[in-house]
Image: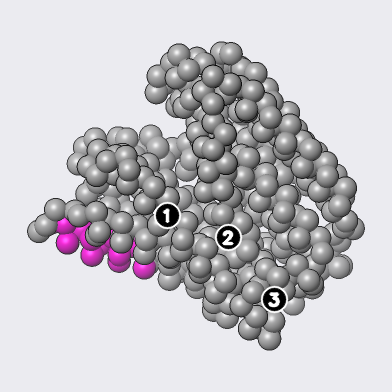
Amino acid sequence: MIMNQYTNIFKLSIAQLITKLVDNMLLVTSIWFITSNYGKSYLTSLLVISTLPHFFLSFFSGKFIRKYSPLRIIIITDYFRAGLFLIIIFFIIYTPLSPIVFFGTLFLSNCAAAFFNPALLSIPLQLSAPNQLQRVISIISSTVSISSIIGPILAVFFYQIEGIKLIFIIAVIGYFFAASIEMTIKTRGVFIFTNQSKDSLQLITYIKKYQSLFNLLGLFILINVFFIPLQLYMPLYSKFIFVGGIQSLSMMEISLGTGALLATILLSIFRINLYERIKIMTSYLLMGVGYFLFAKSNSILNACIALFFLSFCATIGNIFILNFLQRYPDRSDVPGIMACVNFASIAAAPAGLFLAGVFINLDKIQIQVKNYALVIIVLTLVIGILFKSKRVSEESINYE
């Protein structure tokens, strides 16, 4: 039984590593393709089509996952994306890739991702015993960290060979191969379909049922709102503070990914038996410290060290939250809650970039980043005080 459990976790990890690598390659090359072929003004459209499906479909994805099981949704969405990009490959053989076709393809792919992401967040319950959840979540999270390091490198390599067409071909092969691996995974059971899932306003329902959920989601959203702008600040630091080029930016990106990867590896090995409030608050407080150290950085070395530490702490905090959100609620509520988490993650991206764009000042960029760090520390303290939960024991889990 234990051997089968680890075999299934290994299969899922390999499949998700492939999927996330393809996702990262598509994201990076899409930005390059849009900028070079359609103009920088179209990047706003990319942001819109990347977020809107998650906004609108998050109210329904939890229902489908609960009814059809997370694994089945993961398999269907990977096969769907493989078929989608296969159709586009045949289409662009005979005609140039127009903006409508390109953005339409990305939109449909993100519609699938709106179901895929919460399903992936829900599946640990079907693969492991409750006391192994942290390890499984960490292993699955590590695929995201690894792909964030390797994905951009592969994207540059293959894009220079044959452009966006080769990336689409790789997407077909990758999604199809991942889905084929997922077909061989055996799960421990199915989710219970309850009347609660008939409520389309799932987030409101869950907040009423689980008070701690409101506090955690609030912290999760706000932390990500202030974490996302790092993707804007890093190139600005590279150009104006360090007076470097793409090499310094790449070093910072690798530092972020490496910190996240180390965190997932450690949490897949070790368990920390402390109260949820202490674990989550400590992780995010240290993340704020790392953010502050990055703000004060005047050299690329100091920035990389700060970003490594920041990413390490942020990843640990996120894993603790995901672990809590899967163990604290009723098992039948987990898919809907994970859909809310996915919604919160996606909503944080445009909100964070918009906020950073409104207040951006190149002459005072370090001061602004310091203020962001202080906001993270204060928010963590305030919400941590409001957050009330008991230590989650195995006996308290509603697990069928």
Residue that label 2 marks: 343
For the residues bearing labels 2 and 1, Cβ distance under 8 angstroms:
no
Residue for point 36% across, 48% down: 26
Whichever of callouts 1 and 3 sits on the residue coming sooner in the sequence is 1
- Residue 23 location in percent, x, y? 41, 50
Whichever of callouts 2 and 1 sits on the residue coming sooner in the sequence is 1
Residue type, numbered disc 1: Val
**Towards the viewer: 194 or 263:** 194
Residue for point 61% across, 77% down: 200
Label drawn at residue 332: 3
Residue for point 86% across, 61% down: 393
- Chain part drawn in magenta: 80-93
Is the residue marked by circle 1 packed among few (<14), some (14-19), or many (20+) residues within 10 Å?
few
Is the residue marked by circle 2 packed among few (<14), some (14-19), or many (20+) residues within 10 Å?
many
Residue for point 64% across, 74% down: 201
**Residues under labels 1 and 3: Cα distance?**
32 Å
**Towards the viewer: 327 or 176:** 327
Label drawn at residue 48: 1
Q: Please, what is the dominant secondary structure of the magenta stretch?
A: helix
Residue type, numbered disc 2: Phe
- Residue 269 location in percent, x, y? 70, 44
- Residue 102 location in percent, x, y? 27, 55
For the residues bearing labels 3 and 2, Cβ distance under 8 angstroms:
no
Q: Is residue 339 magenta?
A: no
For the residues bearing labels 1 and 3, Cβ distance under 8 angstroms:
no
Is the residue marked by circle 3 packed among few (<14), some (14-19), or many (20+) residues within 10 Å?
many
